Image: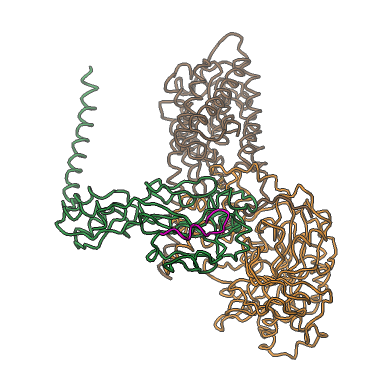
Amino acid sequence: MEPVKLKVSYAPFVRSKDSIESVMYNVALALFPATAMSVYYFGIPALLVTITAIASSVGFEWLTDKIRKKPDSCLDGSAVVTGLLLALNVPSSLPLWMVVVGSFVAIVVTKHLFGGLGFNIFNPALVARVFLLISFPVAMTSWAVPFAVDMQTAASPLGILKTDGMAALSNFSYMDALLGKTGGSLGETSVLALLFGAAWLFYKRYITISIPLSFIASTLAFTGIFYLIDPTTYASPLFHFLTGGLVLGAFFMATDMVTSPLSLRGQLLFGIGCGLLTAVIRLWGGYPEGVSFAILIMNSLVPLLDKWDLDEIKAKKQKSLTTA
Amino acid sequence: MKTFTIGGIHPPESKLTASKAIEKMPVPSEIVVSMSQHLGKPAKPLVKVGEEVKKGQRIGEADGFISAHVHAGTSGKVKSVKSVPHPGGNYSLSVTITTDGEDAWAEGLNTAPIDWKGLSKESIIERIKDAGIVGMGGAGFPSSVKLSPPPDKTIDTIILNGAECEPFLTADHRVMVESAEEVIKGLEIITSLFQGKAKPFIGIEANKPDAIAAMKKAAKGTGIEIVTLETKYPQGAEKQLINAITGRTIEEGQLPFDKGCLVHNIGTAVAIYDAVSCNRPLVERVLTVSGMEISSARNIRAVIGTRFSDIAAFSGGISEKTNQVITGGPMMGRSQFTLEVPITKTTSGILFINNAGLESSRERTCIRCGKCIDACPQGLEPWLLGNEAQFRRLDEAELYGLANCTECGSCTFVCPSKRELVHWIKYAKALVNNRKQRKTA
Amino acid sequence: MISEAFIPAVTSLGSLALILGIIIYFVSKKFYVAEDPMVTIINGILPGVNCGACAYPSCNQFAEELVRTKDTTMTCPVGGADLAAKLGESLGIEMAEPKPVTCAVICQGNSDNARASAEYVGIQDCWAAMQAFAGPKQCRHSCLGLGSCIAWCDFNAMRIENGLIVIDKDLCTGCGACVPACPTGVLVMQQKKAERIFIACNSHDRGADTKRACDAGCTACQKCVKVCPEEAIVIENFVARIIQEKCTACGKCLEVCPSKVNCIVLEKDMVKSTNAS
Ligand code: SF4
Ligand code: SF4
């Protein structure tokens, strides 16, 4: 028999079809409805922001790979997701060069300076958003009005609440918020579209329910308590659920695998922490919206939460060693 | 339906040969009988070049307590006694026999079945030992040793492992369908060694309804319980099987008999029956020849020592796209570097595959998705073990339960980053071993 | 107006700095560890690479032990005779001279000489490859060419060339850290000599098998054993070995080796003439 050229490798010889690409592109796919909605509401500027963010993220990824002499990872989808999330986190009226700056901060500073995908401590898109928010506060908080013809801007519902109090929200419509017909960043608007995408990720098992659930539940619980105490100064939990970046943050940013804890206990604590911080910032903080800050703060605690679990494993083992 | 409690995965089952009856493969012109077909020390060869041997003649003597006898698979003349490639991936001392085509049994072997119930416990174990029977599922632990647990351990559960959770493999499945009687009798012999204090079970995965039916029928009135198990990998791993059937957990460093359990393979049970009642040593076994690149995938009964190349030819040849040949299943098997290797007592299957993933699967960094943690049936943190191994932090790895890993490969299977997790774990284990040896040396 | 904002900030931060400063002062006082100044001096002399060749985990521990015991037999193989002299000078004792050793590769199975077995795909490390099979070369006693040992060398003296480990003699300090790192055992430490002859083959297979697998393999033909006037060559386990103590480097064996690529090699080491005295 003609000998065949054999290759030797180690078991297992079958592998699942999941790959970084499949995970990332599925997340991108899940974000598609929300992106489409925002383009529908905010028109061409939204589309431009999205395209710029994705293109510049992928570009920076390619560039850093070249500089770091790493194998190309610009097409593995993680840069696409970062770009897309960044776009969904900024207003459609943001100047495009600022979007590029945001991508730089996300990809180069937050991801690659920390060692690249898998080693970053903070969610790249969120760091970029916060960076932009602090650097360009005006541009970052002039939200375009849906279906605006000229470059008309308005404050987001949360912003109105912060500056003008409950009274100014008398004509707030929950239905509009659900569908996304309010002022806000691209992805903060349509809760429905976001939930639709999140459902897809659950179906594909790329995210677990623990983080989003504990995150949202604790936000609602906390804001709910104050709503019950004084409904005239504090908005209802439903309002908090439907406005701002809570849904986007809880389902797509807090669940980022790299920057969230590994164990169930860690994930629950992480989610609860995010929720409490979000509520605190929203109710009393200087910024109207606290989701990004909350997630970033909790990101920094993830190594600690993980260490807790690992130390327990080690301690158990050490104990068994000493008793043996 | 029962199953183990933590982890587990669902690889594609690919049981191409589930409905193919076992075919007997003719004895090839040359067989290579390895002296290392079991766990423990290799057997000592008893024959010299040029010597005539008969089928079933003992040609290798067990060397030490954990070792097993080796027998000639057919009659013929010894061609050489030297180190040749072994399906375990390395080389081993082996006896090559040029067969004479007569396939003549040595005297006193392969007799008509006797009533084993008259035999004493000692003589049953003696017969099993003489027949060179070892665990035929993969590990190859000498059965006579396994059947004589230390007197301070009470065995209350005996499990026959019919899970066959590895993709592709169907050898045990077919044996259960075609030789249900022998399997039951083998299990009865095993159970009799424990004076009826132990309850016998046979665990079978739900994807083999015909085997379950056949076993249920054969087991009627024997007190043997057939347990249907969920189809999930690694259901057939010793620790997981015990957990699924009894709910007990084998902790790190423990052996099954520490928890009163004893697990045997289906093939082993049949071999035990043959040995005890017909005085037939272990010289042939049933195995699955499968994979996408073999012309006709099938289940065969072949003489131990038959070369892979002969088996490939018998099964219609292999396509030139074959780039890997694997012994055992695709999850825990071994990839071969030559087709000259022979089958051994523990070869449960041979797969001829085109592993397209080899070119594209470049390891990347862990993205902390946690899939490996969910998959690990031993409740470990494979990503962490992989990282510690990669940076050779062996003490850390040991603290995180390195020794507890059963090398089932579930973690590597699921990892989206294509991390070679079990390989890293195996690597760390090798380094730990090496370090220990140097310390004691 | 300005002072209103400044005063609290300056005072609060200032007092914080003051308090922390005081704490640091006391902590450093309290936990001050007196160190023998001699240890610092010795530490300055030692190479400071913490290679472990002296059997101490770090240079610092070696220094502490040396200062404590003044044991003249303690040697730092890396520094060699020069360093021993300097150490002795500082401590006012006569340090034993270390015998300079170097690392030899007893395999010449590079991609030209050794025949390849199946291609290996996986973790690029010799130990990892060994878990999968006997190695990517037909000879299973050979250098596997994946360079596990390189990471163990603190002196950057190792590299893989054409599928075989190569040692830079000028950089190798003879610390021996690489020896246990090789799963097939092709790295051995040998005493330096002006002319050092050794058998560069590790194959314990029978002659015919060795020959089939490699052009530079020792087939245990006995030719060199017979020709050696000093009886310095023995065959052990199907491979020749030169007993270094007996070998006078006459070079007769080099001429008789029948292998396609001579499996006996001659290396010239830099040996300091001062050592001889
Ligand atoms: S190979 Fe080991 S670590 Fe990986 S899943 Fe199996 S038992 Fe767990
Ligand atoms: S499955 Fe792979 S990527 Fe995911 S946590 Fe485990 S090692 Fe990391």
Characterize the magenta stretch by its predominant secondary structure. Answer: loop
Q: Residue at x 54, y 15 (%)?
A: A93
In the displayed structure, does residue B17 sit left or right of residue A80?
right
In the displayed structure, does residue A143 sit left or right of residue B216?
left
Quarter of the picture for ligand 1?
A: bottom right
Q: Residue at x 40, y 26 (%)?
A: A286
Looking at this rendering, what residue extends furthest in the left direction? Answer: C92
Residue B58, image quadrant: bottom right
Residue C177, image quadrant: bottom left
Viewer-proximal residue among A255 and A303: A303
Q: Quadrant of the N terminus of chain B?
A: bottom right
Viewer-proximal residue among C167 and A211: C167
Q: Is residue B269 magenta?
A: no
Viewer-proximal residue among A44 and B356: B356
Q: Which chain is orange?
A: B
Q: Is residue B90 above or below residue A80?
A: below
Chain A shade: brown
Q: Is residue A138 above or below residue B387?
A: above
Stretch in magenta? C250-262
Mark yes or no: residue A152 visible.
yes
Q: Is residue A311 above or below residue A289?
A: below
Q: Is residue C253 magenta?
A: yes
Chain C shade: green
